[in-house]
Amino acid sequence: MDNMNNDPEMQQMLARQELFENMSRIQKVCWDKCMTEGVDSYLSPKQEKCLEYCTDRFVDAIVIGTSRINQRLSGGSR
């Protein structure tokens, strides 16, 4: 099992899987938040802006959270 954790190919596959899961989560959360007016054949400008801001904030939160976790794991104070 330890060999699998050190395998670069396995690490890359796990990273891709995690990225896909995060993207799916972002898509669902932002879609549910922004598509309150219903779905037409196109997005309204309000819906487009909402989706853009929502995904940007979600990605920012993931980046900040990951950074803080990495700092704690490496012994940093913040």
Image: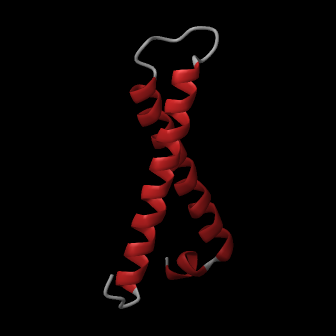
Identify the image quadrant of residue 4: bottom right
Q: How many numbered discs, if any?
A: 0
33 relative to 9 in the view: left or right: left
Identify the image quadrant of residue 33: top left
Residue at image coords 46%, 48%: 57
Question: Between 23 and 4, which is closer to the camera in this rendering?
Answer: 23
Q: Position of residue 37 (x, y in %)?
A: 43, 12
66 relative to 41 in the view: left or right: left
Identify the image quadrant of residue 76: bottom left
Vertical order, 71 against 68 (above or below): below
What's the coloring here?
secondary structure
Residue at image coords 52%, 22%: 46
Vertical order, 9 against 62 (above or below): below
Residue at image coords 49%, 76%: 1
Q: Quadrant of the C terminus?
A: bottom left
Q: Position of residue 64 (x, y in %)?
A: 43, 65
Q: Position of residue 10 (x, y in %)?
A: 62, 68
